């Protein structure tokens, strides 16, 4: 079991990482919330069927109410958010109640937003069940989607704790492993060239990553994110670097229809494009072809889907949260581990999207 401490202006909280991590959840709740009145679990249909019995067994001293939502990005809608609030009200949750977010990144985002707004805010604990959620469960960004853009309706609201039980990852389909591993790659590129080289040298398949290696790389990713969040909780500066690959990635997700492509598959293409822009604009020296080949060997489509309109992608990128005054701002790399945020003109983006689509 590993314990990473996340420090922000709002609070300090632990991230417990390891096989069997939920074994400590019951005692943690008893010690941290001695006057808790009720417990609500928000989970999705897939995680409920696979793992809810294990979580309920770990919560031996509590009788939790379970709210089940759709799997994936379909959970992050106004209607599902409203349904969760209704469930909480009908279950008589009060200001001393606790919410457990049990699932992947979408469930964590939704649950955190429910917790942040229910009775002006009640505590919640993240219990991620995917690789992707190693990123989203830490840092306090909670949100739902709007048809005009991903994560446009949300808040900064830190969890009380994160219990990351790696035993849950064994049931993940390859597509979800691929989605999550893209965020691990992102952390390496924005922060640590040695971490990137280690990943490229060690990871040749996502089908069966040795448990010790998986634990190491996820812990490293969480530590990197924790250091950035400690410097900039509300994304007024360096936290924007965590959006490397996400400007185009979110646009692809939206244009493909949420769920058409996974978040990580979209971000992988977004990272390749951001690297190309970094080479053109900042003179980045980096073997992008080798990077694309590595991504391809892991099963990613490392090129832009040909059917997507470049003009539509540009409009999506203008709706990105980093954009200002309809000017698209990209996280680019001066070198590996040295990101900056740059405004990129529309004509340059359209030209480079055209070049990128020809690869």
Image (cartoon, rainbow, N blue to C red):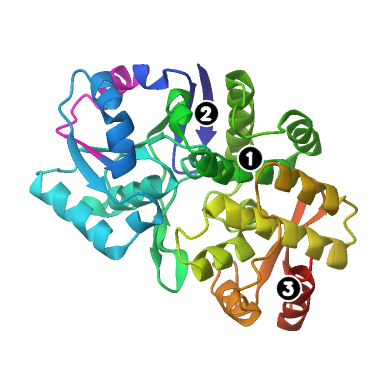
Mark 2 or mark 1, which is nearer the start of the sequence?
A: 2
How far apart, in angstroms, are the residues tagged by discs 1 and 3?
A: 25 Å
Separation of marks 1 and 2 at Cα, in angstroms: 19 Å
Residue 190's spot in the image, x, y percent?
A: 72, 47
Whether residue 135 can be seen here: no
First reached walking from the N terminus: tag 1 or tag 3: 1
Relative to 101, residue 213 above or below: above
Callout 3: SS? helix
Q: Nearer the viewer, residue 118 or 353?
A: 353
**Which picture quadrant has residue 129?**
top left
Q: Is residue 138 above or below residue 350?
A: above
- Tell me, yes or no, whether the highlighted magenta stretch contains residue 304: no
Q: Quadrant of residue 28?
A: top left
Q: Is residue 38 magenta?
A: yes
Foreground pick, 80 / 177: 177
The segment highlighted magenta reads 24-41
Please tell me which residue is depicted at 87% across the width and 56% down the height of the picture.
284
Contact between labelled residues 2 and 1, with CB atoms less than 8 Å apart = no
* Residue denoted by label 3: 353
- Residue 143 picture location, percent across and down: 40, 56
- Decide if residue 161 is on the left or right side of residue 262: left
Q: Position of residue 125 (x, y in %)?
A: 35, 35
Q: Residue at horizontal 64%, vertical 37%?
A: 224
Q: Residue at x 72, y 46 (%)?
A: 295
Q: Residues within 10 Å of mark 2 (few under 14, many from 20)?
A: some
Let me know if residue 27 appears in the view: yes
- Residue tagged by mark 1? 184
Q: For marks 3 and 2, give the one nearer the viewer.
A: 3
Q: Which residue is mark 2?
A: 5
Picture coordinates of residue 67, whole percent (x, y): 21, 44
């Amino acid at each position: 079991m590993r314990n990473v401490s996340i420090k922000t202006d709002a609070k300090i909280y632990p991230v417990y990482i390891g096989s069997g991590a939920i074994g400590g959840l019951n005692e943690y709740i008893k010690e941290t919330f001695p006057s808790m009145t009720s417990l609500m679990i928000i989970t999705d249909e897939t995680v409920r069927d696979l793992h809810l019995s294990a979580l309920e067994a770990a919560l031996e001293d509590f009788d939790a109410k379970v709210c089940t939502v759709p799997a994936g990005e379909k959970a992050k809608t106004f209607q599902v958010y409203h349904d969760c609030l209704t469930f909480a009200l009908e279950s008589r949750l009060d200001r001393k109640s606790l919410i457990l977010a049990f699932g992947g990144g979408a469930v964590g985002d939704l649950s955190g937003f429910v917790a942040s707004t229910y009775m002006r805010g009640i505590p919640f604990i993240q219990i991620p069940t995917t690789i992707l959620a190693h990123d989203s469960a830490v840092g306090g960004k909670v949100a739902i989607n709007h048809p005009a853009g991903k994560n446009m309706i949300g808040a900064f609201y830190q969890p009380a704790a994160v219990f990351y039980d790696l035993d849950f990852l064994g049931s993940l389909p390859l597509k979800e492993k691929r989605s999550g591993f893209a965020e691990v790659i992102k952390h390496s590129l924005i922060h640590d060239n040695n971490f990137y080289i280690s990943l490229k040298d060690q990871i040749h398949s996502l089908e069966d990553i040795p448990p010790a290696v998986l634990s190491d790389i996820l812990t490293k990713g969480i530590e990197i994110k924790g250091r950035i969040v400690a410097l900039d909780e509300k994304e007024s500066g360096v936290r924007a670097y965590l959006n490397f690959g996400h400007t185009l990635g979110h646009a692809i997700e939206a244009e493909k229809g949420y769920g058409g492509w996974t978040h990580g598959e979209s971000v992988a293409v977004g990272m390749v494009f951001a690297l190309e822009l970094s080479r053109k604009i900042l003179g980045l020296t980096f073997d992008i072809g080798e990077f694309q080949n590595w991504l391809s060997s892991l099963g990613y489509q490392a090129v832009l889907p040909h059917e997507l309109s470049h003009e539509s992608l540009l409009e999506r990128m203008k709706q990105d949260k980093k954009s200002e005054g309809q000017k698209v701002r990209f996280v680019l790399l001066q070198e590996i581990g040295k990101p900056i945020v740059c405004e990129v003109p529309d004509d340059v983006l359209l030209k480079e999207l055209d070049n990128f689509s020809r690869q």
